[in-house]
Image (cartoon, rainbow, N blue to C red):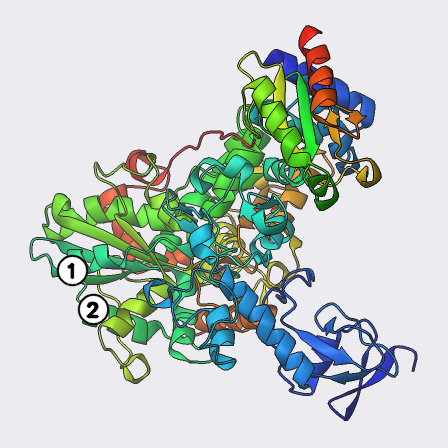
Amino acid sequence: MANTVNLKIDGIDISVEAGKTVLDAAKELNIHIPTLCYHEDLCVAGNCRVCVVEQEGARNLVASCAMPAQEGMVIHTNTHKVRNARRHVVELLLSEHNADCTKCYKNTKCELQDLASEMVITEPMFLDLVPEKNYTVDNYSPSIIKDDSKCIRCQRCVRTCHELQHVSALGVAYKGDQMKISTFFEHPMLDVVCTNCGQCVIRCPTGALVEKNYIDQVWDAIYDPDKHVIVQTAPATRIALGEDFGMEPGNIVTGKMAASLRRLGFDSVLDTDFTADLTIMEEGTELLTRLKKVLVDKDESVKVPMFTSCSPGWIKFIEHMYPEFLDNLSTCKSPQQMFGALAKTYYAQKKGIDPSKIVSVSIMPCTAKKFEAARPEMRDSGFQDVDLGLTTRELAVMIKQAGIDFESLPDEKFDSIMGASTGAAVIFGATGGVMEAALRTAYELVTGREVPFENLNITAVRGMEGVREASVKLEGLLPAWSFLEGVELKTAVAHGLTNAHQIMDAIKKGEASYHFVEVMGCPGGCIGGGGQPIPTTPEIRKKRTEAIYREDEGKTIRKSHENPEVQEIYRDFLGEPLGHKSHELLHTHYKPRKRF
Amino acid sequence: MPEIKELVKGLADKHGRGRESLIPILQGIIAEERYISDAAMSEVAVELDMSAALVYGTATFYSFLDTEPRGKYVIRICKTITCDMKGKKQIVKTLEDLLKIKVGETTKDNKFTLLETNCLGWCHKGPAMLINSIPYDTLDVNKVTEIIMDYIRK
């Protein structure tokens, strides 16, 4: 068999597919080789040298992550020489690392700390160079803190920003002992092309890149008797939160999450899924209205394809990279922001609460949501619509701080109003979900029939391929929509900003034409968001995605327009989709930003 | 900065707009401006449709791609061990006295910048220095004074 190679690792024979590395082969044998700069999602860098192994016949130790397995290789992973070398590598990294671990946000969640602990490095062999270095901390961004004193220059963030997100807000600057990970001219992250997606944060092995946490502010609000503190939880949080408590990826913990939030002391435990359903009503109507204006009225000021606007990483990407397409963005705010605007208006009115006393907290799989909440565009309720945005990880920290045993919690339900949701809202958390939810509703709106897919599952838009296309022929339409008769509705879905870039370039060059395009900033959609539990791998994202679709299938109502609370809000407050009140509270416009 | 825009555009027309053109373009800017400003880097990023952080990373990596304003004549004196053993310290002191600046500084009239550099490959004829792209070797106090006086008169 030409496609496999045979080698020996620690005395055990193994044959692996050609092209696999020594590290891959060792993994198959359940031999653990420590790594730092290596990440499954990224290209090999081979710069940290922690994964070195001894190869018989080779003069030097080799980096197992970068060394392809070759026929007849004899590898030793646990010799005196290997262990010494790895130890020195870690010691050298520590000599330039601000190892004040007890004061670090990543304390106990740090890969470098784990290695140091495994190697029992108690007596440092090298000089501590940290006091000699003029390290800086950038904490101007509402989303991400970059602390160079903790950086080990593994460049996972640089590769993430370049390969997965096509942004390259972070690069490598200077050289030798001066080398650092830097933005353009060392400007704050807030002032450069950074989309706040946080993909660097979930791949940083140390505390050099972390989310800005608002844990104490939330506790302060909860303990303030004058404040009515409400919380909303995004679709993707409920299938990932358990991971921070040692549960396997793919566990659905919706009920436990609601229970834990109630125990933390939130006055009302509500659901972003409610406004996800509302988004479908608004965005679906907007799509049909746009199509009418384009196809029937020939209004050239109206742009198609329409792009989804739920992902704040994607929004900032388009503001920086493709400002000429800003008019193609749906004017719908994201579910988080729709929720925020309604919490301090509709919810406050219904409950008879002074909106100035409401503190609106969101639990998001996302770091960009923090930036979004702080946007000047997002104050339509007369207040900052969402006061504090937390990541899934920060919620896990709060639950631990409160001494709650998460796994033994009973399943509880969300409060009302603004707590009811459908399966269509849950799937917002996975790439393709918004498209699927929108099609379920829009198709039914124009035809009076359910989407022609088995069990409502539009599998064509699901999956992990970077860009996916699907089209639905609109036939047998209701009289009001007869102008769309025979139209083949062309859609596309992209996740991760490199794929978004690819689809945008195709549209720009006229090589692709669609009516509706869904883009999610993070690989896998929100389930792989920058605010989700660490680590992230393709396998973990797959399990989370499966959980999302399981949660959808388990719901009695699976179409947004059938959400009873959504029907109620249109009856009692909003009037109709795209109505006057909706425009005021639920829609917005974005402005171009500098790319360079 | 219309001039910078024109300069970068001209260099991109000459060298091309691929990634491989980045260094020739940056060298072209140095030849004209003697340093690469943030505005120049932004322009390069625009022209090459490339991340500005990447341009910055490349510019800061190479010592001869200066990112701070430099004088008309950039003096780089070799700091490596052979030149040091052959009296480089005395040459630096002479240069500092003549120009009234320290290593790393530029004269007020923006005529001279004094820098140290890694090995110039003139170990057999040290101490050596470079003024812009012209090397000078076997320096002593008198020789370096004469050379600098010539430049001052230029």
Is there a contact, CB below 8 Å, between mark 2 and mark 1? yes
Which chain letter goes with mark 1?
Answer: A
Report how many numbered discs are placed on residues in the image. Answer: 2
Most extreme residue toward the right is A2
Residue drawn at 46 percent across, 61 percent down: A128
What percent of the width, then of the height, locates residue A498?
A: 63, 48
Q: Is residue A186 left or right of residue A474?
A: left
Q: Quadrant of residue A44?
A: bottom right
Residue B76 appears anywhere in the view: yes
Residue A209 appears anywhere in the view: no
Residue A122: which disc? none
Q: Quadrant of residue A488?
A: top right
Residue drawn at 82 percent across, 22 percent down: B14
What percent of the width, then of the height, locates residue A146?
A: 44, 50
Where is mark 1, residue-wise? A222
Q: Say above or below: B120 vs A279.
A: above
What percent of the width, then of the height, locates residue A442?
A: 49, 50
Q: Nearer the viewer, residue B27 or A413?
A: B27
Where is mark 2, residue-wise? A264
Q: Does dot 2 land on a helix, a strand or a loop? A: helix
